[in-house]
Image (spheres, rainbow, N blue to C red):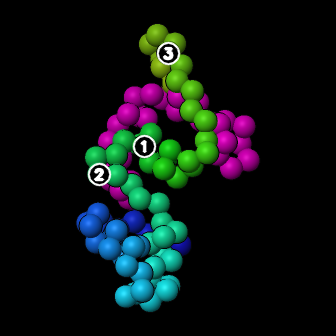
Amino acid sequence: MQIIINIDKDIYNHIVVDSEYFTSSLVNVFKNGTPIPDNATNGDVIKAMFPNAKVDDYDYGKDPVIDVYGIDDTEYITLRKEWWNEPYQKGGK
């Protein structure tokens, strides 16, 4: 299961750095999580979720796209650049 929560950056850092004050399972939840920056774009979220993926930007005039290599077993995925640069909306709002 995945869960996305909003947490202040200072509190997040406190839990991860001062982990002796918290239960190990709680600390592991935060350490194993993927922080998503405020005001992130869809592209920022994909890069955060797949840090080893390679991203190529192609501009075909009216239809610029982003190819992302290294996600799961797929050779690559192609995304519209317009979508890539849109603000990320948590929970598909």
What kind of residue is marked 2? Asp
Which class describes the residues within 10 Å of circle 1: few (<14), some (14-19), or many (20+)?
A: some
Where 69 sits versus 4, above or below? above
Image quarter for residue 84?
Answer: top left
Which class describes the residues within 10 Å of circle 3: few (<14), some (14-19), or many (20+)?
A: few
Where 89 sits versus 81, above or below? below
Q: Which residues are magenta?
A: 66-93
Q: CA distance from mark 1 to mark 2?
A: 10 Å
Work out whether residue 58 can be spotted.
yes
Residue closest to the eye, 52 or 41 = 52
Mark earlier in primary sequence (1, 2): 2
Expressed as whole percent of the image width and height from the top left, the position of residue 48 reads 48, 50
User: What residue is rendered at 49% in x and 86% in y?
Assistant: 24
Expressed as whole percent of the image width and height from the top left, the position of residue 33 reads 48, 66
Q: Which residue is mark 2?
A: 38
Q: CA distance from mark 2 to mark 3?
A: 27 Å
Find residue 44 and name its label.
1
Q: Secondary structure at mark 3?
A: loop
